[in-house]
């Protein structure tokens, strides 16, 4: 039986090529992601280690505040700490360093270099003969005057700058300032190495000034005298400076490496999810392929059974075939993954110096590829292999093979039960009920998908295929009708082939509908709530401090302006009874997030808006209100009505809260409003906001402007544009532009997700090609007879293509329905907790386009099988058995 299985595999190896392709692509995607992640982590760790290689200890403030945008904010230390450190015994050298974000290079077009995306721009102070390995000078020198800067080589080359050129920088505290470029720097003694980030070096005084920390350093780096170890000098410093935090240089390196590696790991996990989706799609293709092969070999299996082969041997032979296919596909996928990783590493070399070639696959990678690849293949082939052992030899020899899956009542009952159970799990998960809501939603979604694909799907495949054939009939004629009958006569095969496409289309539809709903909700909310004519906003949601503090006054002074009202964005922690109870059971929200110190008492973190109650309600329609804007003074808060109801707050109640800057405070609910902007249901009057928020958040990030009665809006726009002409990180937007700016990141995210899902769609189309190719081999005699009675090659090609289109449209429509249902369920769950926040919106044009693209892709996938069918020799086909 072993020899029979291997010989059978070699004789039919071409039939398993496309099956292998599905596994190869999935494994390549996953292993490529793993290797790229490993290479990035190695490179980042090496880069960080090189930068801090000369540091034996670091002295810094113990006070930290976490933010949602990266590493925790740490309070700087006074410059006097440097003098104290230098006087500690055992210290050879000590240097103070400024290291902060927020200042941006301006390109020749007056825009932020890089558009505010990509590698971060970091502000450093230039220190001659630095303890840290921040690199060398490629051209020129380091800055020695406050109007001089040095930048990295990649930025200089991209901007076309050389020493002596003027450079504009958008600063946090001084607006746009012009500096003279005096040096181009990089990693390594020669300054040729790429830095990854976009560093800007200033003099110490200037770096301190433009980062808002005059006379302060972010940390003090220490090099010990020869013979003194890192731990020893750290202990000595800690004893001498008990008010500061002291860590070893190794700990400092590990901390920075870990922080960056977490981001790489999150990105790797996000991308890997789509690789697993692709492998899940491959399951259906493998299942379908082996089902067809088992059916084609019924007489051969029966003959083996007749001459003494046991069921276990037949099962083993089929599974051996699956193992061989899985091993070969896994190895090829591993090789392709290495190639993909190499290509991506080469592309990333333009950003920063990588640690040599991509990480080679280790034992773990090889084992992972083999276990996943072989496991997926064997599990997918198990059901068809088992089915082949259940056919009695006599029945198999007679080739009685009628697919009655569409007639099975039990199949429908099982399918409906799976849908009900899966739907219940999804509902419970969305309601945040149970030990693992995410897992419940995932299992429920898989149950519904599998039910429609393999259980209920076959019962719908036959009638749908015939219906679609009738629709195509006026155009396709006999070819369309014959294609419909071909798809209908084996509904299980049609459904399982379409299932692969169903999964991809379900995910695409789900994401498209959710994105469209978010956009529609944002548009509706701004249209209903914002009565201003223009919004002056930062170009990035994280560009805190980009709007100068006097800009609101300048706008208000314009003759064509009736009202200009600033808005700020910050964070606080709720400490009411509900918050404390929820924090006690929360498992997903870490302490110390959103601008709250790590040592704050447990509670719920929330975003808050800071507004001027004297002008805010002139530019925003908050609906019906309880209380008056005049009641909003220091120590008060305004809350959205529904949110207040869910927390049991009433007008006049006092709420305990915790701020990053001032700690525990009590706020009085002085006003309840009906509708807000959707960002947060809590508004703080500017006095309360300014008194309690961290400096990072204590600046305007939007200004809402309403024109005076009779004023020309175009002239007002020109005046506003003139005011921000020298502020490249600030833009003037009308309400439509404001909506587009708020939803722009959604479009970017959509493009990324669609690109990653393309792999699953491609594998699904490979499945259609594979099924049609195998079915043509199965129907060789039938096709020969059709040609013999007069069907032309063109008609035969069209028949195969129409069949592919029917399968593709069936899969796409099932995916559309499931995607719409899943998105509706998610919207209902969100709306239950946040009425009015989300408006369900179907992007009809997009959904129609998805269906059309699926049908066209199906036709393209049928090109090779159709060509093969048309080239069959008529007499040889008729004679085949």
Image (spheres, rainbow, N blue to C red):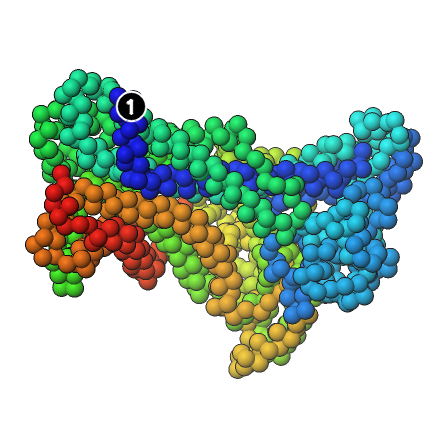
Q: Quadrant of the N terminus?
A: top left
Which image quarter: residue 712?
bottom right
Q: In the image, residue 405 lies at what x, y percent?
A: 15, 37
Within 10 Å of disc 1 (Cα), the crowding (few <14, some 14-19, many 20+) is few
Q: Is residue 173 left or right of residue 736?
A: right
**Figure check: 330 above or below 565:** above
Residue 604 position, x and y percent, is 54, 40
Looking at the image, can residue 1 be seen? Answer: yes
- The number of discs equals 1
Q: Which residue is painted at 29% across and 31% down in the image?
A: 9
* Residue at image location 89% in from the left, 33% down from the top: 91
Task: Decide if residue 147 is on the left or right side of residue 560.
Answer: right
Give how far across and how far down residue 263 sits, in percent.
58, 42
Image quadrant where one finds the C terminus? top left
Q: Quadrant of residue 114?
A: bottom right
504 versus 303 height, above or below: below
Q: Residue at x 24, y 31 (%)?
A: 384
Front-lying residue, 752 or 671: 752
Which element is circle 1 on?
A: helix
Does any portion of residue 122 appear in the rendered image?
A: no
Relative placement, left or right, of 720 versus 192 is: left
Q: Nearer the viewer, residue 70 or 858?
A: 858
Q: Nearer the viewer, residue 558 or 129?
A: 129
Q: Which residue is mark 1?
A: 3
* Image location of residue 582, percent across then percent down: 49, 35
- As rendered, which of 650 and 722 lies closer to the eye? 722
Left or right for 32, reference 102: left
Residue located 81% across and 66% down the image: 164
Q: Is residue 382 above or below residue 67?
A: above
């Amino acid at each position: 039986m072993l020899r029979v299985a291997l010989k059978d595999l070699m004789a039919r190896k071409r039939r398993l090529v496309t099956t292998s392709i599905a596994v190869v692509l999935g494994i390549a995607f996953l292993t490529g992601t793993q290797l790229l992640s490993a290479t990035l982590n190695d490179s980042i760790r090496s880069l960080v280690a090189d930068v801090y290689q000369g540091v034996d200890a670091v002295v810094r403030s113990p006070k930290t505040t976490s933010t949602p945008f990266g590493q925790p904010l740490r309070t700087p230390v006074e410059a006097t700490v440097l003098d104290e450190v230098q006087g500690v015994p055992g210290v050879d050298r000590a240097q103070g360093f400024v290291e902060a974000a927020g200042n941006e290079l301006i390109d020749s077009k007056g825009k932020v270099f890089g558009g505010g995306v990509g590698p971060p721009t970091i502000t450093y102070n230039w220190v001659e003969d630095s303890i840290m390995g921040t690199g060398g000078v490629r051209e020129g020198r380091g800055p020695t005057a406050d109007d001089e800067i040095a930048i990295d080589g990649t930025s200089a080359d991209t901007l076309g700058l050389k020493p002596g050129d003027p450079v504009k920088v958008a600063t946090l505290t001084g607006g746009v300032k012009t500096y003279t470029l005096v040096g181009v720097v990089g990693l390594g003694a020669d300054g040729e190495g790429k830095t990854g980030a976009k560093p800007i070096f200033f003099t110490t005084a200037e770096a301190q000034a433009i980062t808002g920390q005059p006379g302060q350093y972010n940390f003090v780096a220490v090099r010990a005298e020869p013979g003194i170890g890192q731990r020893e000098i750290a202990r000595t410093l800690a004893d001498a400076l008990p008010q500061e935090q002291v860590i070893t240089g190794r700990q400092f390196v590990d901390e920075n490496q870990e922080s960056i590696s977490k981001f790489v790991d999150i990105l790797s996990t996000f991308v890997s999810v789509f690789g697993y989706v692709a492998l899940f799609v491959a399951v259906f293709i493998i299942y379908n392929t082996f089902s067809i092969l088992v059916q084609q070999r019924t007489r051969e299996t029966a003959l083996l059974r007749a001459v003494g082969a046991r069921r276990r041997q037949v099962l083993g032979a089929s599974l051996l075939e699956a193992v061989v296919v899985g091993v070969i596909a896994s190895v090829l996928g591993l090789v392709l993954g290495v190639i993909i990783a190499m290509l991506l590493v080469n592309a990333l070399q333009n950003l920063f110096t990588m640690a040599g070639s991509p990480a080679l696959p280790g034992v773990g990678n090889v084992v992972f590829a083999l276990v996943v690849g072989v496991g997926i293949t064997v599990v997918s082939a198990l059901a068809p292999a088992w089915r082949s052992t259940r056919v009695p030899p006599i029945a198999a020899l007679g080739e009685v093979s009628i697919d009655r899956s569409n007639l099975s009542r039990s199949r429908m009952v099982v399918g409906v039960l799976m849908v009900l159970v899966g739907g219940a799990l999804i509902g419970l998960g969305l309601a945040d009920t149970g030990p693992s809501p995410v897992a419940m939603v995932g299992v429920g979604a898989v149950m519904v998908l599998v039910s429609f694909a393999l259980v209920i799907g076959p019962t719908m495949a036959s009638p749908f295929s015939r219906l679609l054939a009738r629709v195509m009939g006026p155009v396709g004629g006999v070819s369309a009708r014959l294609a419909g009958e071909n798809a209908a006569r084996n509904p299980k095969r049609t459904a399982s082939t379409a299932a692969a496409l169903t999964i991809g289309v379900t995910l695409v539809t789900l994401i498209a509908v959710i994105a469209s709903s978010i956009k529609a909700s944002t548009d509706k909310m701004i249209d209903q709530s914002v009565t201003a004519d223009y919004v002056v906003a930062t170009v990035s949601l994280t560009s805190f401090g980009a709007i100068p503090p006097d800009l609101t006054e300048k706008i208000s002074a314009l003759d064509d302006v009736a009202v200009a009202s600033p808005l700020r964005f910050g964070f606080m922690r709720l400490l009411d009874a509900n918050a404390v109870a929820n924090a006690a059971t929360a498992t997903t929200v870490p302490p110390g997030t959103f601008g709250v110190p790590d040592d704050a008492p447990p509670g719920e973190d929330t975003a808050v808006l800071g507004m001027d109650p004297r002008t805010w309600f002139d530019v925003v329609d908050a609906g019906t209100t309880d209380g008056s804007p005049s009641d909003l003074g220091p120590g008060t808060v305004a809350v959205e009505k529904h949110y207040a109801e869910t927390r049991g707050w009433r007008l006049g109640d006092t709420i305990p809260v915790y701020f990053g800057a001032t700690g525990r405070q009590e706020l009085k609910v002085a006003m309840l409003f009906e509708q807000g902007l959707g960002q947060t249901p809590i508004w703080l009057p500017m006095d309360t906001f300014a008194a309690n928020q961290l400096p990072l958040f204590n600046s305007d990030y939007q200004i809402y402007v309403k024109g005076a009665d009779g004023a020309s809006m175009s002239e007002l726009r020109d005046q506003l544009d003139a005011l921000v002409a020298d502020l490249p990180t600030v833009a003037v937007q009308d309400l439509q532009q404001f909506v587009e700016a708020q939803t722009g990141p959604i479009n970017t995210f959509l493009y990324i997700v669609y690109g990653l899902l393309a792999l699953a769609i491609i594998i699904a189309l490979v499945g259609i090609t594979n099924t049609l190719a195998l079915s043509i081999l199965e129907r060789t005699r039938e096709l020969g007879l059709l040609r013999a009675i007069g069907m032309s090659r063109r008609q035969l090609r069209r028949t195969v293509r129409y069949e592919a289109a029917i399968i593709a449209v069936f899969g796409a429509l099932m995916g559309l329905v499931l995607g719409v249902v899943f998105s509706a369920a998610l919207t209902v769950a969100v709306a239950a907790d946040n009425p009015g926040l989300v408006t369900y919106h179907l992007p009809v044009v997009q959904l129609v386009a998805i269906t059309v693209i699926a049908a066209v892709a199906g036709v393209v996938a049928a090109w090779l099988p159709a060509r093969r069918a048309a080239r069959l020799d008529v007499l040889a086909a008729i004679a085949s058995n």
